[in-house]
């Protein structure tokens, strides 16, 4: 796969659309390095976290539309420098592939300003995940970076997500749809926003897509090790072009093997996941065409 250089001033959504088109993939490879699960061979390195993640990136770049490093895995192991090196490596070696920094930040004022600076200057991320619980003034500092993406939690795939996300407003609308509506109608004036919607709830995913329309990207965790159904995810969440989704898989790819063939196993898992997603896209587009011609 040949990668051509994209101007670093391109907006996140433009870079993402280019990646969807050129890579023919909706797969996001999550980078959640855990030294307790890494192959023994990589642990002999002086920089095991960077070397492992770099090996995964190089092995799977052909099949991915983006990479999503999870900041907690690096910070808990004192590996922030490895994350910096990794993000710089991705942005220079695979400049067409967006970096989605998964940090789920949620704060206000100068604290949020510094979180944004950390993500977009230190790590050179193209987008960041954030928590909307504190409202617009916790999101606004990220939107000030006009070329960057802001991916907002909406309907999460964890079991406890239902503790609050189904609280209903006066007209009976659940909270997660109020978040989707607010982001689409009030916060996304510059077209920088995306939403996180878990693959384990395809019915809610379909409702979010209907609420926000065709253009807003949806980051969908929960396939692979978490058991989300790929076909149901695509049928529920794809836009009219059969795109619009960032379907994340982390552990199933990263730890496909704990032996010396870990890169080959990661390649196979990423390729199979990409192919399964594309097969579901073909079904989606065929069913859409059939419905339109009926």
Image: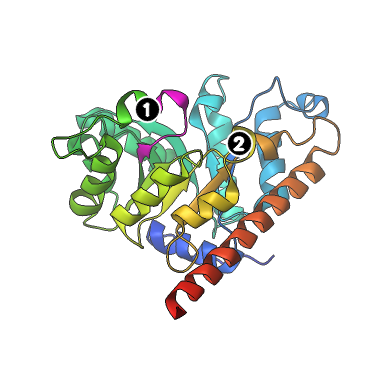
Per the image, the residue denoted by label 2 is: 227
Residue drawn 46% across the image and 80% down it = 293
Do the CB atoms of the residues marked 2 and 1 lie less than 8 Å apart?
no
* Residue 155 included in the magenta stretch of the image: yes
Question: Which numbered disc, 2 or 1, marks the residue that appears first in the sequence?
Answer: 1
Per the image, the residue denoted by label 1 is: 162
**As drawn, is 279 to the left or to the right of 46?**
left
Q: Residues within 10 Å of mark 1 (few under 14, many from 20)?
A: some
Residue drawn 32% across the image and 31% down it = 165
Query: Which quadrant holds residue 112?
Result: top left
Q: Nearer the viewer, residue 40 or 113?
A: 40
- In what element is the residue under mark 2? loop
* Residue 35 included in the magenta stretch of the image: no
Mark drawn on residue 242: none
Q: Position of residue 223 (x, y in %)?
A: 58, 41
**As drawn, is 109 to the left or to the right of 236?**
left
Q: Position of residue 272 (x, y in %)?
A: 72, 52
Q: Position of residue 291 (x, y in %)?
A: 46, 72
Q: Position of residue 170 (x, y in %)?
A: 13, 35
Rendered position, 54 above or below 12? above
Q: Residues within 10 Å of mark 2 (few under 14, many from 20)?
A: few
For the C terminus, which image quadrant?
Answer: bottom left
**Which range of residues does the magenta coloring cover?**
153-161
């Amino acid at each position: 796969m040949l990668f051509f250089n994209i101007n670093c001033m391109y907006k996140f959504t433009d870079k993402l659309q280019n990646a969807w088109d050129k890579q023919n993939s909706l797969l996001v490879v999550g980078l959640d390095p855990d030294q307790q699960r890494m192959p023994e061979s990589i642990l002999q390195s002086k920089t095991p976290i960077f070397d492992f993640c770099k090996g995964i990136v190089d092995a799977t770049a052909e099949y991915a539309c983006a990479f999503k490093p999870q900041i907690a895995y690096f910070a808990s192991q004192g590996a922030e420098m490895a994350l910096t090196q990794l993000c710089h490596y991705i942005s220079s070696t695979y400049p067409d592939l967006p970096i989605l920094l998964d940090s789920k930040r949620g704060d206000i004022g100068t604290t949020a300003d510094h979180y944004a600076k950390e993500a977009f200057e230190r790590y050179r991320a193209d987008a960041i995940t954030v928590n909307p619980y504190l409202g617009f003034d916790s999101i606004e500092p990220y939107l000030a970076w006009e070329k960057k993406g802001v991916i907002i939690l909406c309907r999460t795939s964890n079991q406890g997500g239902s503790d609050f996300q189904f609280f209903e407003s006066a007209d009976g609308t659940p909270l997660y749809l109020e978040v989707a509506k607010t982001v689409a109608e009030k916060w996304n004036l510059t077209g920088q926003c995306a939403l996180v919607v878990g693959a384990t709830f395809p019915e809610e995913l379909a409702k979010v897509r209907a609420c926000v329309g065709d253009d807003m990207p949806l980051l969908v965790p929960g396939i692979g090790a978490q058991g989300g159904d790929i076909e149901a995810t695509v049928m529920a969440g794809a836009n009219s072009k059969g795109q619009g989704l960032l379907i994340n898989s982390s552990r199933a790819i990263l730890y496909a093997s704990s032996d010396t063939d870990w890169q080959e196993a990661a390649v196979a898992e990423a390729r199979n996941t990409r192919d399964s997603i594309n097969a579901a896209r073909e079904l989606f587009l065929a069913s859409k065409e059939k419905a339109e011609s009926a």
